[in-house]
Image (cartoon, helix red, strand yellow):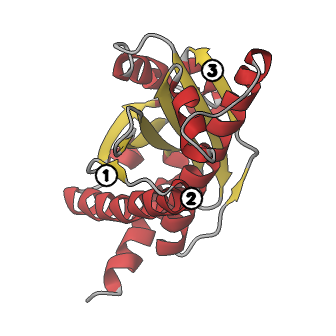
Amino acid sequence: MDNISQISEEERDILQEIMNIAFGKAAADLAEIINIFVVLSIPDIKIVMAEDLPGYIKEEFSEFGNISIVEQNFWGEFKGSALLIFPADSGKELISLLGDNDEPSYEPQSSDILESETLMEVGNILIGACVGKVAELLKDVVTYSPPRVIIEDHPSVSMPKTLFDPSNAAIILKTVFCFNERNVNGFLFLITSNNSVSWLKKALVDFMEQYE
């Protein structure tokens, strides 16, 4: 955990501001499509050992029981995994947000497929905008794996195994969001391992030098 523990309070503050900008961009992009304002909390930054990630996320969502997860990995100098997590059945509410009316029509047997596709679409927008903005601000270029959706499952099954190396730590960047006027809320995590820390520290310095 040595590399990550060397991140200073000033660097954390800079990273939090970058994430605030990135999450704001993600919310704005989604609001343009569904025409409903998305409210985000101030990003929270935590550092944990990689092997503790599943337990950490499970604890975060213990009150929800079952959950729906959209996972997407990204690669660049800044690399890791994005997790968009909702309480189970939120996808059904999101269907109406992305549809043409408040009462979408679909056959019962197709509802699970439609819910999964809706979660994936929301995930594509939020994750793509957020990770893309972080990369842009830090002068990086990232590529993405196709997103995948896991409905009503345990968060640990979606965690990249490479983050479980006991010798690694992970930086967790988290925000809580809700859709104004709708009973939908969720959590957006960006998880990057300490393999990116040396680059990240330099990128944060370069970012601040633009304003000096």
* 78 horizontally vs 7: left or right: right
Above or below for 119 versus 60: below
Identify the residue shown where x is 78% and y is 22%.
110
**Disc 2: which residue:** 33
SS for dot 1 = loop
Q: Position of residue 138 (x, y in %)?
A: 48, 71
Above or below for 127 versus 102: below
Above or below for 72 versus 68: below
* 109 horizontally vs 181: left or right: right
Q: Quadrant of the N terminus?
A: top left
Q: Badge 2, how many Cα within 10 Å: few under 14, some, many 20+?
A: few
Instruction: Report, in whole angstroms, how far the alpha carbon at label 2 lies from the one at label 1.
Output: 40 Å
**Farthest residue toward the top?**
65
Q: Badge 3, how many Cα within 10 Å: few under 14, some, many 20+?
A: many
**Disc 3: which residue:** 151
Amino acid type, label 2: Ile
SS for dot 3 = strand
Q: Nearer the viewer, residue 96 or 130?
A: 96
**Disc 1: which residue:** 6
Identify the residue shown where x is 53% and y is 53%.
34
Q: Quadrant of the C terminus?
A: bottom left
* 125 horizontally vs 190: left or right: right
Q: Position of residue 186 (x, y in %)?
A: 42, 34
